C-alpha cells in the first residue's frame, strides 16, 4: 500500500488554474511546468514576464510601467526589455494597451496587459512536456525507470511567521545530570576551602588598616 512519503506513489492531481486566478500564480505555475512554448525563448523573455507578473495587477493583469522600470526589475538592459516585449507581443502573450512617451525628464509609462487565458492555454502542453523530459531522464543509465513519475519531490508547506520567530524549544531532559566542568570543580573547591577556614579578626583589621592608609596617601598625592 502506497503511503504519502512513498515517491513511487502517483502524484496528487494538479490544482486546476483558470483565467480567474491571479496573474503571478499563473506565471509561477508556468515556470514550475518548465515554461512550455516559452522554454526555447531567450532567458530575457522569461525574466521580463516574471517582472510583469510582479508589477501587474493580479486580477486584471494590467501593468503600468516603463521599459526602464521593467529592466531594473528583470535585471537586464532597456534594449533587452524591448526585444523581449516584442517577442511576447508577436505571440500574443503581452498586449500593448497604451504606448509610453517622454515628457521632458519624466516618462509616461506604457500600459500593458498579459492575457491570462493565453497562459492557461500554455499550461497543459507545458506539463506534458515536463513529464516527457522526466521520463527520458529516468530512461538513461542510472535513472529510475520503475517510478511512475521520476524525480518526484514531496511538497512541503513553507513555515509560517509564528513558527520562524518562536523561541527555540528547550531540549528534552534525559534525567541524568551532567558532570561539572574543571572550572566549576575548581570554583567549588575554593568556595569550600574559604568556608572551612574563614579569615581571623586580626587579619581583617590589618587589611582594613592597610586599605585606609592607601586611601589617605592617595588623597595627599591628588591634593
Image (cartoon, rainbow, N blue to C red):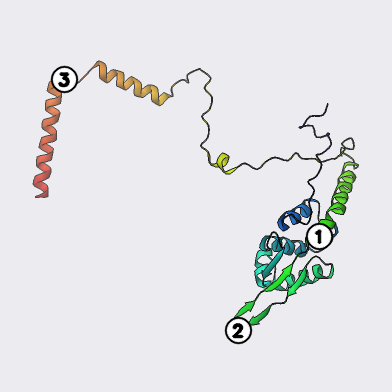
- Coordinates of residue 175 in the picture (x, y in percent): 51, 17
Q: How crowded is mark 3: few (under 14 residues within 10 Å), some or many (20 or more)?
A: few
From this view, report whether residue 107 is shown above or below residue 177: below
Q: State the residue lying farthest toward the top.
A: 196
Q: Mark 2 or mark 3: name the one nearer the start of the chain.
A: 2
From this view, report whether residue 104 is shown above or below residue 114: below
Name the residue that disc number 2 marks.
104
Disc 1 + disc 2, Cβ < 8 Å: no
- Coordinates of residue 84 in the picture (x, y in percent): 77, 68
177 sits left or right of 121 in the view: left
Q: Distance between the residues labelled 1 and 3?
A: 95 Å
From this view, report whether residue 112 is shown above or below residue 20: below
Q: Residues within 10 Å of mark 2 (few under 14, many from 20)?
A: few
Residue at (53, 27) in percent of width and height: 171
- Coordinates of residue 158 in the picture (x, y in percent): 65, 43
Q: Mark 1 or mark 3: name the one nearer the start of the chain.
A: 1
Under circle 1, the secondary element is helix
Q: Quadrant of the N terminus?
A: top right
Name the residue that disc number 1 marks.
117
In the figure, residue 63 lies in which quadrant?
bottom right
Q: Residues within 10 Å of mark 1 (few under 14, many from 20)?
A: few
Name the residue that disc number 3 marks.
200
Amino acid at each position: 500500500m502506497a503511503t504519502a512519503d512513498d515517491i513511487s506513489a502517483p502524484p496528487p492531481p494538479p490544482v486546476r488554474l483558470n483565467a480567474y486566478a491571479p496573474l503571478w500564480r499563473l506565471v509561477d505555475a508556468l515556470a514550475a511546468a518548465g515554461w512550455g512554448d516559452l522554454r526555447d525563448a531567450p532567458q530575457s523573455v522569461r525574466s521580463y514576464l516574471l517582472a510583469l507578473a510582479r508589477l501587474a495587477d493580479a486580477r486584471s493583469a494590467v501593468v503600468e510601467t516603463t521599459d526602464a522600470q521593467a529592466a531594473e526589475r528583470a535585471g537586464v538592459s532597456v534594449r533587452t526589455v524591448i526585444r523581449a516585449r516584442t517577442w511576447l507581443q508577436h505571440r500574443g502573450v503581452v498586449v500593448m494597451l497604451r504606448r509610453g512617451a517622454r515628457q521632458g525628464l519624466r516618462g509616461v509609462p506604457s500600459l500593458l496587459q498579459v492575457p491570462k487565458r493565453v497562459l492557461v492555454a500554455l499550461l497543459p502542453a507545458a506539463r506534458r512536456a515536463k513529464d516527457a523530459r522526466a521520463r527520458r531522464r529516468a530512461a538513461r543509465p542510472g535513472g529510475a525507470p520503475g517510478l511512475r513519475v521520476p524525480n518526484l519531490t514531496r511538497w512541503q508547506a513553507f513555515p509560517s511567521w509564528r513558527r520562524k520567530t518562536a523561541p527555540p524549544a528547550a531540549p528534552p531532559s534525559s534525567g541524568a545530570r551532567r558532570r561539572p566542568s574543571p572550572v566549576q570543580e575548581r570554583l567549588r573547591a575554593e568556595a569550600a576551602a574559604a568556608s572551612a577556614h574563614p579569615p581571623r579578626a586580626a587579619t581583617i583589621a590589618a587589611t582594613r588598616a592597610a586599605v585606609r592608609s592607601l586611601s589617605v596617601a592617595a588623597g595627599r598625592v591628588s591634593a
